[in-house]
Amino acid sequence: MNSRRNFLKAMSAGGLLLTAGIPAASWGAKQAHVVIIGGGTGGATAAKYLKLADPSIEITLIEQNPNYYTCYMSNEVLGGDRTLDSLKFGYEGLRARGIKVIHDKVVGIDPDTRVVSTQSGSAIGYDRCIVSPGIGFRYDLIEGYDESMIDTVPHAWKAGPQTTRLRAQLEAMPNGNNFIMAAPPNPYRCPPAPYERASQVAYYFKKHKPDSKVIIVDPKSSFAKKDLFTQGWEKLYGYEKDDDFDESKMIQWRSSNGIKAFDAGAHSVVSADGEQFGQVGDVINIIPAQKAGALAFAADLVGESGWCPVSVNTFESTRHPNIHVIGDACIASPLPKSGFAANSEGKACALAVAALLNDREPGQTSFTNGCYSLVSDDYAISIVAVYRLTEEGNAIAKVSGGTTPIDASDEEKLVDVKYAYSWYNNFTRDIFF
């Protein structure tokens, strides 16, 4: 318990944000140029820490959008008083470090000529390229549902306009109607996030729509931090178990082999078991199955799984040399697909690229992951873990970790809320400044 608490203290204060040592002075990498595509958590981290590792490397970061909205903490926009603008970050901090930031859309990567092509017509050469393409969605797996419907049935799994749209739908929903969330199958971005979302919506309902319910339709037989979430749900909102039907309880979780179809006319979802959930007046939140982002497919970086295979000691693609893939899109199990893991991977990749450009062997790095889930405004639960490369350097192994104890006190849950906000402030400062 004490070691986990100390880990959380260090994490919230920014003390566990480095995955390996940064060289004390520039290695001087022969005027090398690295192009980084994607300015989210992974790409922005890689840009910053590559410049720290070797200031002589020319770095160009290409990101389509002028601002990035963090997915982590975005569930508070749905259930609490957080604004979307509080999740917004620009790139002036990276520019101040000497990193060239271009706002453009990448349309192709030629691994033979080592050239990145953009929508505006630019052709940018590189010695090495780091790609952080994020996630895409498998709309094709749900009958009657496609990308054209996300304005009316938003997934809000990328923070931005869909997040505020989903909040507006909750506000407009009559008291007594329900929030139906179709959770995604594994693997997907941020394993605990659907259940934090359910918690935050219940928190909103408890204050504003006490006769409404949260119904989770899940393809999984269990989920991340289930015992801790359900403990919080029982305490704060009332939790209806599969074998204990009780209309007075606000949160219901249904393990039903996932969603097979969306019925737009009835405004409902149909599970693979044939059960129908929802009606006109309810808010439907379908979180589709996921895959690597579109650029990863366009650049031929994706394997049969729909994700990007990499050599985990350097995050170099196993499909094309001199291209590295980090963040949610890459296969780095047992590291989860999370913002914290993307940050850790960005640092490890930056150090590996700096070493390779200086004709050195990459070091044996370690990785950290942590996640706070806000069950209400004064109740949070957490999970932490440390990973490192195996001695062979071809796999990642978990070496330690833990979650909030099931018998943690209310005071400890409140402390975790404070740690969560402190972590967010320090974490985003580590990435963008």
Image (cartoon, rainbow, N blue to C red):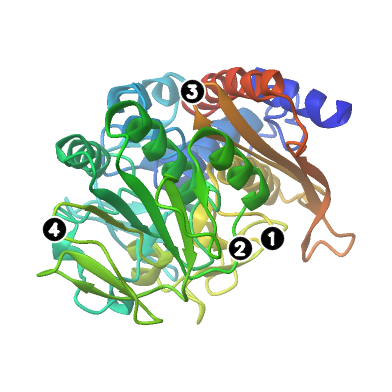
Q: Secondary structure at mark 4?
A: loop
- Residue 280 numbered mark, or none: 4
Residue positioned 36% across, 59% down in the render? 287
Instruction: Pick the residue in front: 74 or 95.
Output: 74
Q: Secondary structure at mark 2?
A: loop
Q: Is residue 88 above or below residue 75?
A: above
Residue positioned 47% across, 59% down in the render? 245
Is residue 411 rendered to the left or right of residue 123? right
Q: Distance between the Cα atoms at labels 2 and 1?
A: 28 Å
Mark 3 is surrounded, within 10 Å at the Cα level, by few (under 14), some (14 to 19) or many (20 or more) other residues, namely some
Per the image, the residue denoted by label 1 is 312
Instruction: Pick the residue in front: 399 or 93.
Output: 399
Is residue 315 rendered to the left or right of residue 213? right
User: Which sits earlier in the primary sequence, circle 4 or circle 1?
Assistant: 4
Instruction: Pick the residue in front: 205 or 371.
Output: 205
- Residue 72 numbered mark, or none: none
User: Which sits earlier in the primary sequence, circle 2 or circle 4?
Assistant: 2
| Residue 128 in view (yes/no) | no
Per the image, the residue denoted by label 2 is 222
Total marks shown come to 4
Per the image, the residue denoted by label 3 is 377
Q: Secondary structure at mark 3?
A: loop
